[in-house]
Each structure stands twice: as structure tokens, then as C-alpha cells.
Image (spheres, helix red, strand yellow):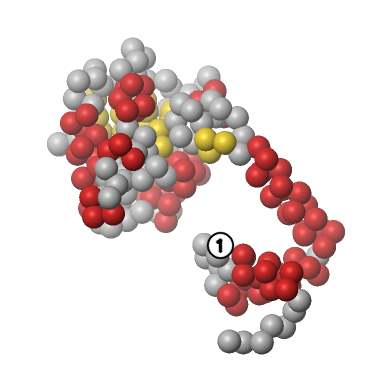
Amino acid sequence: MARAAAGPEIERLIQLLARLPGLGPRSARRAALHLVKKKEQLLDPLAAALAETRDTILTCDVCGNIDTQSPCTLCRDQSRDPSLICVVEEVGDLWALERAAVVNGRYHVLGGTLSPLDGVGPDDLNIPKLVERARADEVTEVLLALNATVEGQSTAHYLTDQLAGCNVSVSRLAQGVPIGGELDYLDEGTLAAAVKARKAMGG
Ligand SMILES: [Zn+2]
């Protein structure tokens, strides 16, 4: 094991930063050094922002989005089209679609995909709430914006069956999402094209 180059507090900071997606040990070390060197400009406001986020974060009771209020900002936004519910696996996918600014409806976050091998069944996902929302009169379309993975696609078929009794058309993203592709990693243009050219499920 490498010898510590700094006191335990700084080593702890480095270890925690190294757990962030996209940061390995080397870049975590670089980030930590940057933070301690820029105490007033960066470290203090970051510490305050983290504490504030921790104290205010919650999950939207309506859609499963993460925000500081429930219903969340998107669910409260009256300018959004209430007839469309866009279903995503994770909050990161919702953020990716919002970056592409192509969905003008509401969202529904499943919290994952069906994965029998990992023991994830329908009861583990935010599905009953989706069916309930899809029954509302104003909802006419449910767009399944799931990843182009085996789990994403089998979840899409399961949801299509579950939504059969609701008076909604069920659509999925168009090809253009590469096989095995995860939405969070797609560029905005590809995502926008996939939403605009969406197809009816089964079609
Ligand atoms: Zn919401």
C-alpha cells in the first residue's frame, strides 16, 4: 500500500472523491489538492452546497425524480404538456433528456429495470404509480425512453402489457439509440432524434 502523502482528513477526502463516477484515484487526488488550495473560492462553497443538498433533497412522490420539493419542479411546471408521460430508468436519463430539451411532457422514473438475475421484479420498480398516472384522463401517450439494453427492452415489453388497459398509446424511442446504449451517454442530437422519431410499441 502506498504511503499517505497527507493527513487522514485529506486522505479521506481523496478516497471519497475517488468514488465519484468518472474520477479515479489519480484525478481524485488532483481534485482534492485543487479544493484545498482554493479554500475560499471552491472548498467552502462546495461544502455549503453539499450540506444544503443533503438537507433538502427528496424524491418526488408523483414521478420519482430527485429534487428539493415534491411534487418536483417538472411536475409543477404548468407549461408542460400533461398528455405525455416519458418513462425513464433513472434520474440521470431524465436529466439527459432535459439537456436535449426534447420532451415537453412529464416524466416517470422507474428506478431501474426488470432483471430476474439480479432479483429485480416488478414490485421493486415504480410501476404501479405509472399505471395509476396513465389512467388519468389527460394522459394520452406514454413514451418508454428506456435504454437499448436487454433489460431495458424487456422492461418496455412488460410495461406495454401493464398499460394495455389504460387508454393511452405506448411508444418507444426510435432506432438511433445504439444497441446496448444508455441514454445518459448519448449526445443531445441523437437523443432528440430518437424522441422525435419515436415508434408505437410493437411497431
Ligand atoms: Zn415529479
Can you tell me whether the CB of the residue at mark 1 lies under 8 Å from the nearest atom of ligand 1? no
Query: Image point 75% across, 79% down: which residue?
Result: 6
Residue 141: give x, y in percent of width and height.
30, 25
Q: Among all residues in the image, which is located at the extreme right?
A: 40
Mark 1 belongs to which amino acid? Leu
Residue 155: give x, y in percent of width and height.
25, 42
Image quarter of the C terminus = top left
Is residue 93 shown left or right of residue 200?
right
- The residue wearing badge 1 is 20
Q: Among all residues in the image, which is located at the extreme left?
A: 202
Quarter of the image for residue 154 reads top left
Residue 179: give x, y in percent of width and height.
25, 56
**Residue 20 vertical position relative to residue 115 in the rendered view, above or below:** below
**Number of other residues with Cα within 10 Å of mark 1, as a class: few under 14, some 14 to 19, many 20 or more:** few
Local SS, label 1: loop
Residue 197, visible in the rendered structure: no
Which of these two is toward me, 196 or 72?
Answer: 72
Query: Image point 74% across, 54% down: which residue?
Result: 47
Query: Image point 44% across, 30% down: which residue?
Result: 63
Residue 99, visible in the rendered structure: yes
**Residue 15 vertical position relative to residue 92 in the rendered view, above or below:** below
Which of these two is toward me, 20 or 5?
Answer: 5
Quarter of the image for residue 131 reads top left
* Count of numbered tags: 1
Quarter of the image for residue 108 reads top left
Is residue 29 shown left or right of residue 130?
right
Query: Image point 61% across, 39% down: which residue?
Result: 57
Image quarter of the N terminus = bottom right
**Residue 146 vertical position relative to residue 180 in the rendered view, above or below:** above
